[in-house]
């Protein structure tokens, strides 16, 4: 059958924009935003220059697509880890298990929001976008904390997010167990927010 491979339906080839974002996903994570030029993105994605500009008017637009892809992947991984735990306390702490796996795998994307905000500055378009994604992560953590019945879920989310960002920086410094250390502190934080 046409469009059918030996193992089933043929996989749809990625579009040009998907190839560009996939190339950016690796290059920006490992080298930063300023160090990667449009010509490098074009070479790495295998598209023509005209094709690149048909999909993205500027490098900033590619960065925004990269940030959005990482946010979606990060949020989905956190939601999945929470859903796997019936116990609400374990569900909250499972967030650190996600980061633990990423740190041990050396996922450069884990630094993305902090790195882009620091590299570009909080007033830059890309810095502001990174801050918005971090705000959305705090909102996600607050929803999880609220479902667990914690007092002041927003305050808890702020403190937990500080632990996550600290773990991200510690992992970048070379501590592969940073998430485990942060998880221990988060358990103490949960005790402080538990309703009696």
Image: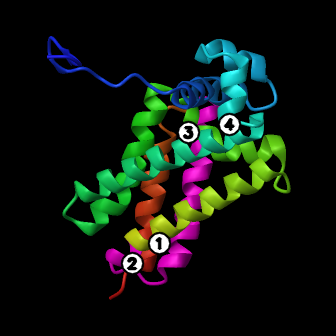
- Spot occupied by residue 100 in the image (x, y as percentages of width and height): 42, 39
Foreground mark, 1 or 4, reads: 4
Which residue lies under the disc numbered 3?
Answer: 110
Foreground mark, 3 or 4, reads: 4
Q: Nearer the viewer, residue 57 or 25?
A: 57
Question: Within the magenta stretch, is there residue 141?
Answer: no
Which residue lies under the disc numbered 1?
Answer: 142
Res 12 → quadrant: top left
Which residue lies under the disc numbered 4?
Answer: 62
Q: Nearer the viewer, residue 56 or 70?
A: 56
SS at mark 2 in the image: helix
Which residue lies under the disc numbered 2?
Answer: 146
Which mark is first along the chain, 2 or 4? 4
- Spot occupied by residue 123 in the image (x, y as percentages of width and height): 85, 56
* Picture residue at 66% right of the left edge, 61% below the top: 132
SS at mark 4 in the image: helix
- Between the residue at mark 3 and the residue at mark 4, the CA separation in whole angstroms equals 18 Å
- Between the residue at mark 3 and the residue at mark 1, the CA separation in whole angstroms equals 20 Å
Give, as a single range, the part of the protein colored magenta. 145-174
- Spot occupied by residue 179 in the image (x, y as percentages of width and height): 47, 44
Foreground mark, 4 or 2, reads: 4
Labelled pair 1, 4 in contact (Cβ < 8 Å): no
Looking at the image, residue 154 lies above or below residue 34? below
Looking at the image, residue 98 lies above or below residue 164? above
Which mark is first along the chain, 1 or 3? 3
**Residue 172's disc number:** none
């Amino acid at each position: 059958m046409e469009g059918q491979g030996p193992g089933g339906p043929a996989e749809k080839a990625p579009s040009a924009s998907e190839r560009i974002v996939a190339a950016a996903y690796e290059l920006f994570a490992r080298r930063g935003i300023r160090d990667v030029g449009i010509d490098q993105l074009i070479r790495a994605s295998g598209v023509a220059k005209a094709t690149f500009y048909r999909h993205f008017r500027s490098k900033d637009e590619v960065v925004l697509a990269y940030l959005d892809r990482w946010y979606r992947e990060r949020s989905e991984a956190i939601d999945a880890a929470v859903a796997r735990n019936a116990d609400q306390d374990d569900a909250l702490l499972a967030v650190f298990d996600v980061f633990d796996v990423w740190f041990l795998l050396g996922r450069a994307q884990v630094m993305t929001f902090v790195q882009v905000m620091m590299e570009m500055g909080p007033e830059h378009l890309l810095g502001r976008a990174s801050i918005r994604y971090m705000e959305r992560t705090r909102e996600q953590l607050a929803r999880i904390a609220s479902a667990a019945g914690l007092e002041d879920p927003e305050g808890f989310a702020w403190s937990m997010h500080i632990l996550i960002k600290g773990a991200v920086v510690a992992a970048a410094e070379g501590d592969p167990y940073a998430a485990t250390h942060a998880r221990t502190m988060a358990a103490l934080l949960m005790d402080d927010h538990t309703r009696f």
